[in-house]
């Protein structure tokens, strides 16, 4: 009986905090463990309170992602209104492991909602203004964003790019440059001063990784130049061929930053076949933190597809409730996930 009363008290207190705006729509709600400590009770009691909040539409749980506030106060400012959203259109340059991850995570967020996700793949997308029942996301997290319109994007549009572009539209910045700088710094601190970059064709057609790598070499006082660059087709086999060519151009290279994990795996295989994987050298760093990097045990930059999807979803919630997107620019900084071979 006491536990029943406590779970109702917790439920009422949390519901009141949500209604008063302590937790805003789209905010990440405290996890069970934090609430258990706060109310000095059991997981079961807290879970019962949260279950009731879910049933009444105050919060929603997402497997592996946490719990988010979905309640919207009826006393919102004038002019705000709910929109019946039917479609999320993702306009992107290509589908790869990273963008596919964003799509998958976003699909989990809207799993129990009657909303479709449509992918619109275009190298040079042209501007289109969909109706209010469609939410547009210009998804160019690894691009300079040169094809994204600077004007004319309405309140149903969100821009995701690798740098802060001069756009009137709300945006999320995937700060790839800071991630690459962190990777170069890590390589230098590990004793690798002769670094090479193995990119893909995207680095020639509007990508930002190549330039970020060269900037990072200068920032960390490392030698670079054109002989530090080589491009592959973004596959393991292409990575092997690119590594062979790179070793001809830069035979003293001991550190290799690769544009994706498949290329990095190819570079790794090339170095193994040439007997250059013995001892602490060389260092191969991938990009994307995929299962490939986990399998081959090399470090990789995690672009945080799950966090980008969560931010997109927060904007979706804001749009469906108010008819506009969050106005502040959010920044997502990649993390370098360190892995070492078991025999190191």
Image: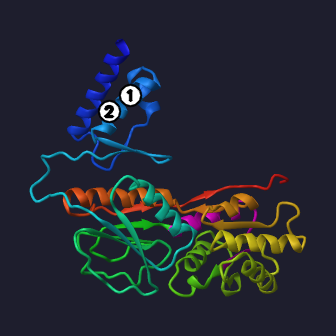
- Bounds of the magenta span? 176-198
Count neighbours of disc 1 (C-alpha within 10 A) and say few if under 14, some if 14 to 19, many if 20 or more. Answer: some
- x%, y% of residue 260? 63, 71
Residue at image position (34%, 47%) is 27
Q: What element does badge 2 sit on?
A: helix
- x%, y% of residue 291? 66, 60
Q: How many marks?
A: 2
Asked whether 180 falls inside the magenta stretch, the response is yes
Count neighbours of disc 2 (C-alpha within 10 A) and say few if under 14, some if 14 to 19, many if 20 or more. Answer: some
Quarter the N terminus occupies: top left
- x%, y% of residue 150? 30, 81
Residue at image position (25%, 45%) is 71
Q: Nearer the viewer, residue 10 or 242?
A: 10
- Name the disc covering residue 52, or none: 2
Do tag 1 and tag 2 residues touch (Cβ < 8 Å)? Answer: yes
Question: Is residue 294 shown left or right of residue 85?
Answer: right
Residue at image position (46%, 86%) is 123
Question: Is residue 310 shown left or right of residue 279?
Answer: left
In the picture, residue 271 is in which quadrant? bottom right
Asked whether 189 falls inside the magenta stretch, the response is yes
Q: Which SS type dominates the magenta stretch?
A: helix
Residue at image position (76%, 74%) is 267
- x%, y% of residue 343? 85, 53
The residue pinned by badge 1 equals 48
Q: Nearer the viewer, residue 91 or 114?
A: 114
Q: What element does badge 1 sit on?
A: helix
Quarter the C terminus occupies: bottom right
> Could you tell me how far apart the alpha carbons at marks 1 and 2 are, in whole angstroms?
6 Å
């Amino acid at each position: 009986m006491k536990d029943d009363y406590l779970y109702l008290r917790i439920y009422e207190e949390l519901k009141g905090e949500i209604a008063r705006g302590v937790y805003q729509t789209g905010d990440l709600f405290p996890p069970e463990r934090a609430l258990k400590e706060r109310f000095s009770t059991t997981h079961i009691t807290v879970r019962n309170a949260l279950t009731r909040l879910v049933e009444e539409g105050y919060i929603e749980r997402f497997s592996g992602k946490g719990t988010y506030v979905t309640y919207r106060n009826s006393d919102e400012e004038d002019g705000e209104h709910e929109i019946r959203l039917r479609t999320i259109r993702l306009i992107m340059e290509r589908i790869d492991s990273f963008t596919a991850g964003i799509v998958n995570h976003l699909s989990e967020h809207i799993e129990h909602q009657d909303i479709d996700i449509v992918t619109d793949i275009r190298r040079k997308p042209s501007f289109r203004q969909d109706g209010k029942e469609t939410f547009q996301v210009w998804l160019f997290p690894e691009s300079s964003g040169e094809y994204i319109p600077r004007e004319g994007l309405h309140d149903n549009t969100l821009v995701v790019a690798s740098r802060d572009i001069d756009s009137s539209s709300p945006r999320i910045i995937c700060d790839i440059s800071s991630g690459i700088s962190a990777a170069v710094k890590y390589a230098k601190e590990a004793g690798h001063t002769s670094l090479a970059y193995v990119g893909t064709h995207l680095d020639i057609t509007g990508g930002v990784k190549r330039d970020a790598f060269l900037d990072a070499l200068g920032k960390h006082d490392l030698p670079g130049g054109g002989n530090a660059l080589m491009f592959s087709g973004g596959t393991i086999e292409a990575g092997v061929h690119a590594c062979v060519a790179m070793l001809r151009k830069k035979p003293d290279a001991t550190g290799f930053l690769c544009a994706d994990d498949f290329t990095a795996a190819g570079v790794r295989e090339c170095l193994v076949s040439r007997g250059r994987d013995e001892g602490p050298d060389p260092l191969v760093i991938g990009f994307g933190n995929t299962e490939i990097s986990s399998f081959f045990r090399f470090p990789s930059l995690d672009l945080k597809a799950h966090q980008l999807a969560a931010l997109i979803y927060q904007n979706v919630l804001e749009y469906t409730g108010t008819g506009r997107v969050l106005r502040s620019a959010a920044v997502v900084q990649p993390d370098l996930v360190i892995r070492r071979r078991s025999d190191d």
